[in-house]
Amino acid sequence: MSKQDAAKKLIVDDLDYVISDKVIYSKASMEVNEGEIRGVLGPNGAGKTTFFDIICSLRNADRGIIKNDFLNQVYLSQTIMTPPVLRMGDISRLALSFISPKRPSKQVFLDRLNSWAPEVSNRFSEIWSKKSAICSYGEKRWFFTLTLLASESDLIILDEPTAGVDPEFRHYIWKCLSAAAKEGRAILVSSHNVNEVADNCDVFYMIYGHRFNIFNSSEEFMSCHEADSLDRAFINAATMTSN
Amino acid sequence: MMNSVMSLFRICGIFIKEQFKEPIQVFWIMLSPCLLFYFHAYGNGLLEMNYLEVSSWYYSYVAASVALFGFSFYIVGRRESGFIRSFVYTRKAKLLFLGAQFVSYLLVALVYFSAFYLATASLFDGYNLDEYFFLLIRFSLCFLFFCSFGIALSLLPLNFQNANTIISISLFSMIGLAFTGHLSGSEYLQIANHANPFQYAVEIMRSKTSAFSQYSLYVIPLYMASNVMGVMMFRVNPVWSRY
C-alpha cells in the first residue's frame, strides 16, 4: 500500500440535502485529506454550517455517501457563549473532556503553540487564567480555535473561526492552522473573508449551484468568475447561487 | 472505560466549581431556607414540633431547587450557549454530559442538604447520625424524583429566560399548592395535590421504611426512564438558532 493510499480522508460524494423545500445541496461532492487546509466559501445561507452539521451527524443528508477515516474530529460552531464565572482554562478542559479521554494539560498546549507561533503562546497563557466574563468575544474565539487545534484531534472543523478576531490574531490563527496541517491534521474551515481563505487554504470550495465548486488558487477563482478581485469573484459566484 | 470515568470526574469538578461560584444560587438554595427555617421555628413555636415534620418542607425545597434550577436549568443554559452543539453531540458525549451533570448536582445537593442539617438540627434534638442518614437517603430519592422532571423539562424547546420563568412558576405553584392543601384540608386541594410532585417529595421525606421502599419502586424506574428519554431525545441545537 502506498503512502498516498494510507492517508486519511473525508470523502463526501453525491450529497443531496433539502430543507423546507429549499434545495441546499444537489449531488455535491468534496474531500478533505490529512495534512491539508480546505476552505469553504459561500454567501450567508448557502449551507456552510449545514454541511458541517451533516459531517458531524447533527443532521442527516437526504442522499449521498460520507466516508470519514478520521477517528477524532472536533467542530467549533459559530457561536459559543462561555460560563462567566469560570476561567478560560477550565472551559477549555471542560470542552476537551468531551472530545479526548486524555487530561488536557496547559503545558502541552503551550509547548505545541510555542512550536507553531511563539508570539501567541504568552497571550494564550494569559487568557488561560483569565475569567471568561472579562474576555472579549474575539479573545474567546481565537482561544477556542487554538485550543482545538492543539488538541489530539485529527480532523478539525472550524465554522468562521476568524469572525470577530482582530487582524493580528487572525494572522496567528492561520499560522497555527498551517502548522497543525503540516503535522498531519486535516482542517476544514469556513469564512466570509475570501482573501484569507484564498491565501491560506491548500484548496477551497465556493458553494453555488447547490454544489462545492473547487478552486486551487485565487487566480483560478477570479478567472472563472471573470472578476478582477476576489471580492468581485465572490459576488459574481454568489449571484449565480441566488439566480 | 477508565478514561471515561476520569473524564466524568474532571467534568464534575468543573461543574461543581461553577455552581459554588454562583453566589445567587448559594443564597437562594442554601442560606435563604436556613433563615426562613429560623424565622418559622422561633416565630411559630415550632421547636416543640417534630424536626422531621417541620424540615421535610425545606429539604424538599432544596432537592427541587437543585434539581430544577441547577441540574435542569444548566442543561438548558449549556445548550443555549452553543456549548452542547459544539462539543456534546455524539452519543458517548451525551452520556458523559448527562452523567456528569447528574453526579455534580447530586453532590451539590448533598452539600446543601448537609449544610441545612448542620444549621437546623441543633435547634431540636441535636445532631444524630442515624437521623442524618435517614434524611439523606430520602433527600436523595427526592432529588432523583425532581431530576426526572428536570430531564423532561430540558427536552422542551425553551430558551434560557423561558426555562427560568417556567421553573420559577412551577416551583412556586407546587409549594403553594402543597402548603395550602396542608393548611386548609380542602378536598379539592387534596385531589389537586395527588398530581403535585412537591407533595410527594414531602411525603417521601417523612416516609417510614416500608413507605420509602414503595416510593423507591416508583421513583427509581421513573428516573431511569427519563434518562433513556433524555439521551434519545437530547436537544443539541439552541432554540434561538435556525437549526
Image (cartoon, coloured by chain):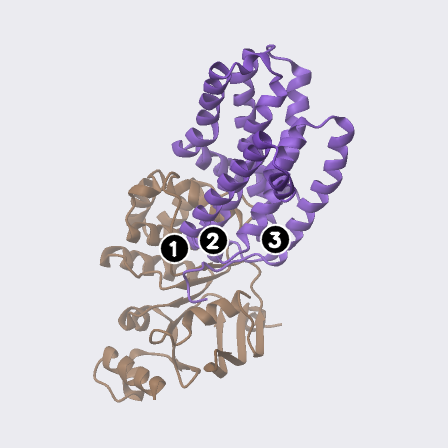
Q: Chain of mark 3?
A: B
- Mark pair 2, 1: CA separation: 19 Å
Tag 1's secondary structure?
helix
The residue identified by callout 2 is B79
Q: Give the amino acid type for the residue marked by disc 1 in the picture.
A: Thr
The residue identified by callout 3 is B230
| Mark earlier in primary sequence (2, 3) | 2
The tint chain A carries is brown
- Side of A222 relative to B41 (left or right): left
Q: Is residue B7 visible?
A: no
Q: Give the amino acid type for the residue marked by disc 3 in the picture.
A: Gly
The tint chain B carries is purple
- The residue that appears at 47% across and 72% down in the rendered structure is A51
| On screen, residue A196 above or below B26 | below
The residue identified by callout 1 is A145
| On screen, residue A18 above or below A141 | below
Contact (Cβ within 8 Å) of mark 3 with mark 1? no
Do callouts 2 and 1 point to residues on the same chain? Answer: no
Q: Give the amino acid type for the residue marked by disc 2 in the picture.
A: Arg
* Number of marks drawn: 3
